[in-house]
Image: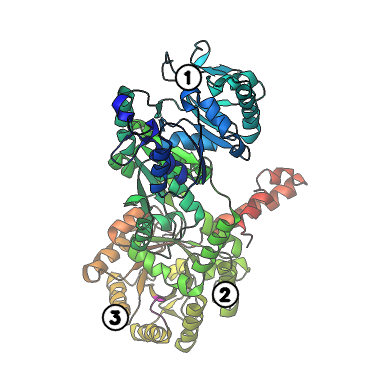
């Protein structure tokens, strides 16, 4: 190294404006949580010791001097330090070695003893090569070329293997064989000291022996330091598992973290308790995070193509299951420009599951649950609700998800239908099931789910009764009650004019709405006025008159209903209502006009789509078929072939 090392040992050679070889090594070790370091010294011993002390790193450093360094090789330095090297697994490295963090991470992740080798680099003439035999390292030295790979003096060695090697080193030195490589001793015990190759391929892992090496390695190191790393989080709280993977990620380069938007989180898990800006600020204040960006969907594609990070870091929990297609897309996009996916083992710490369970319990509490529907409408523009009439159907609505085009789709809310509730009890849909029983259905569903609930309030009953219904629903945590502008014995709307149905007068229904709004205690609870004018064929003008009157009376939303398969009159109503009122949410139940897509509804100004009875209507035919199949075959075999396993059903039911 010439004049470069005339005043200090080679390990103190600067490789960047921030670091020497040694300071970088020590900082790397500290960042990986390694706390004890043994440094053997010789040339410029005091200079080296003083230098390490002023680095002020969280390391316990033991210095061991080789008094005859000028006439021995490093095998004797290890011999001098033997008494402090016998208690644990070790990392063994030369003081002139520069390596990137991913090399060290890969080696530390190995459960077996290993040495850094490269299958892509040419064999050097004068440096170490490792001979590979039966998948293990058989010999290490500069003289081997057959069956060999380029190797570097960087080892991670388990205690059992290290003590075998160290014992042979002691034997060499006791026999005054002190001028050879320590690897000479290893070669004699390699049958028992089992060290495996860790192929680092083209990653930076190189010794600096000459000024030319210094120039090459410094240039490569500058490139390593400019690498970027991308991760994505949806979390609302940070636990030690998050911190651990963030620490691993920031060792690989400049860390950019994507934060899922509120809409993406709501589609993937459940409505976030902490809004995007606060979650973003939380991550921005973590040491080592260089930049935080929004990720608008579960798909990484847009952000990856814009940022082109060198690495994407994720836990290995997405290799199977629901997120697998997202992972496949990430791999495909990385392949477009040469990026790399780094996956770390996902932590199954019971404490993290407990935190998630606590979060789930929190979002299911009435005061938090109640207001989420209004927030979802404001955030997404359009929300979807699926009918549920029991705890198990509630769990189906809660947990069913579909991944399409890099986005996750799930129902935003649950619809507690009087029709389905009555049908499940084998009773007609004429408001026969009393509110006490219907509230019990809400309790059953709320006990096992977290999503907002929309309640079918039928006509609302007498105004005096409706006041108490509002107070009860609000207290329970229901988000919205929908009441229809009819009076008398309730008949299902889909019968239309086939049965006698009486529509309430506008003043009377407005009075009921105003009484309900006055009774509620919070701003979160919503009263939706359902208009039956189109069902009863009283014309568009009547429907619109009622809609404007009801919103003026305080209705938080308007539901417009039709039993026609052609959605034209629904679209006409929405268009004309939106000409004068652009903010009040519009609710539709597309049981008849079922060809219209959610996006088309949203584009026209609809805010809530309720699938009002599909679980009931699909469930009963399946049960009838099961009963018939058993009767026809006089056994259960044919029926069981159509059945969901009990194990699958049980997995739907939460343990807590």
Mark 3 → mark 2, Cα distance in angstroms = 30 Å
- Residue 288 showing in the rendered view: yes
Q: Nearer the viewer, residue 19 or 297?
A: 19
Of the two numbered discs 1 and 3 in the rendering, the one whose residue sits closer to the viewer: 1
Q: Nearer the viewer, residue 504 or 374?
A: 374
Q: In this image, 259 relative to 645: left or right?
A: left
Residue 552, which numbered label?
3
Q: Earlier in the sequence, mark 1 or mark 3?
A: 1
Q: Residues within 10 Å of mark 3 (few under 14, many from 20)?
A: few
Contact (Cβ within 8 Å) of mark 1 with mark 2: no
Residue 428 screen position, x and y as percent: 58, 71
Residue 148 screen position, x and y as percent: 51, 15
Q: Residues within 10 Å of mark 2 (few under 14, many from 20)?
A: many
Mark 1 → mark 2, Cα distance in angstroms = 78 Å
Contact (Cβ within 8 Å) of mark 1 with mark 3: no
Contact (Cβ within 8 Å) of mark 3 with mark 2: no
Residue 636 screen position, x and y as percent: 75, 47
Residues rendered magenta in the picture: 522-527
Q: Nearer the viewer, residue 15 or 331?
A: 15
Residue bearing the label numbered 1: 128
Q: In this image, 503 relative to 83: left or right?
A: left
Residue 268, which numbered label?
none
Would you say residue 417 sits in the magenta stretch? no
Residue bearing the label numbered 2: 438
Q: In this image, 30 relative to 113: left or right?
A: left
Mark 1 → mark 3, Cα distance in angstroms = 85 Å
- From this view, report whether residue 133 is shown above or below residue 326: above
Look at 55% across and 27% down and name the residue there: 76
**Secondary structure type for disc 3:** helix
**Secondary structure type for disc 2:** helix
């Amino acid at each position: 190294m010439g004049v470069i090392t005339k005043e200090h040992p080679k390990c103190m050679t600067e490789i960047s404006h921030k670091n020497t070889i040694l300071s970088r090594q020590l900082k790397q070790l500290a960042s990986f949580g390694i706390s004890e370091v043994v440094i053997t010294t010789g040339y410029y011993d005091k200079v080296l010791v003083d230098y390490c002390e002023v680095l002020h790193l969280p390391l316990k450093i033991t210095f061991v001097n080789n008094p005859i360094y000028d006439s021995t090789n490093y095998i004797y330095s290890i011999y001098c330090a033997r008494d402090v090297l016998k208690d644990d697994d070790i990392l063994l490295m030369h003081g002139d070695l520069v390596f990137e963090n991913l090399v060290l991470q890969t080696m530390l992740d190995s459960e077996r003893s290993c040495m850094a080798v490269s299958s892509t680099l040419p064999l050097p003439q004068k440096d170490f090569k490792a001979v590979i035999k039966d998948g293990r390292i058989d010999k290490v030295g500069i003289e081997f070329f057959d069956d060999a790979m380029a190797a570097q003096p960087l080892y991670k060695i388990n205690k059992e293997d290290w003590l075998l090697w160290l014992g042979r080193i002691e034997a060499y030195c006791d026999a005054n064989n002190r001028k050879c490589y320590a690897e000479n001793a290893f070669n004699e015990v390699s049958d028992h000291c089992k060290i495996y190759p860790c192929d680092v391929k083209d990653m930076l892992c190189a010794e600096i022996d000459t000024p030319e090496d210094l120039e090459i390695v410094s240039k490569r190191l500058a490139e390593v330091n400019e690498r970027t790393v991308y991760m994505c989080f949806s979390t609302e709280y940070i636990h030690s598992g998050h911190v651990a993977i963030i620490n691993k990620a920031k060792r690989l380069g400049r860390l950019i973290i994507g934060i899922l938007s509120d809409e993406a989180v709501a589609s993937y898990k459940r409505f976030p308790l902490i809004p995007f800006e606060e979650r973003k600020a939380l991550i921005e204040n973590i040491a080592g995070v260089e930049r935080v960006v929004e990720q608008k969907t579960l798909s990484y594609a847009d952000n990856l193509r814009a940022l082109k990070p060198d690495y994407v870091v994720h836990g290995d929990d997405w290799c199977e299951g629901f997120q697998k297609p997202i992972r496949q897309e990430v791999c495909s996009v990385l392949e477009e420009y040469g990026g790399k996916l780094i996956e770390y083992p996902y932590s199954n710490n019971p404490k993290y599951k407990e935190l998630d369970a606590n979060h789930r319990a929190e979002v299911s509490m009435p005061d938090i649950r109640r207001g989420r529907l209004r927030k979802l409408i404001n955030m997404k523009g359009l929300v979807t609700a699926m009918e549920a009439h029991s705890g198990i159907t509630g769990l189906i609505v809660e947990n069913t998800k579909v991944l399409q085009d890099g986005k996750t789709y799930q129902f935003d809310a649950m619809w507690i239908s009087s029709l389905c509730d009555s049908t499940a009890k084998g009773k007609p849909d004429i408001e026969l099931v009393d509110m006490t029983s219907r509230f019990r259905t809400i309790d059953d569903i709320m006990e096992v789910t977290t999503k907002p609930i929309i309640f079918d309030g039928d006509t609302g009953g007498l105004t005096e009764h409706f006041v108490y219904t509002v107070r009860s629903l609000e207290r329970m945590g229901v988000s919205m009650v929908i009441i229809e502008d009819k009076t008398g014995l309730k008949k299902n709307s889909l019968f239309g004019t086939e049965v006698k149905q009486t529509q309430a007068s506008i003043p009377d229904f407005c009075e009921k709405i105003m009484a309900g709004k006055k009774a509620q205690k919070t701003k979160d609870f919503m009263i939706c006025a359902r208009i039956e004018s189109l069902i009863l064929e009283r014309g568009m003008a009547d429907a619109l008159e009622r809609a404007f009157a009801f919103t003026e009376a305080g209705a938080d939303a308007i539901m417009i209903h039709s039993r026609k398969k052609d959605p034209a009159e629904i679209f006409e109503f929405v268009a004309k209502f939106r000409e004068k009122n652009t903010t009040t949410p519009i609710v539709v139940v597309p049981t008849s006009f079922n060809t219209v897509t959610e996006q088309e509804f949203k584009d026209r100004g609809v805010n809530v789509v309720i699938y009002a009875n599909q679980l009931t209507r699909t469930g009963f035919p399946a049960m009838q078929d099961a009963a018939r199949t058993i009767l026809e075959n006089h056994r259960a075999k044919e029926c069981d072939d159509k059945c969901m396993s009990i194990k699958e059903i049980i997995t739907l039911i939460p343990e807590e």
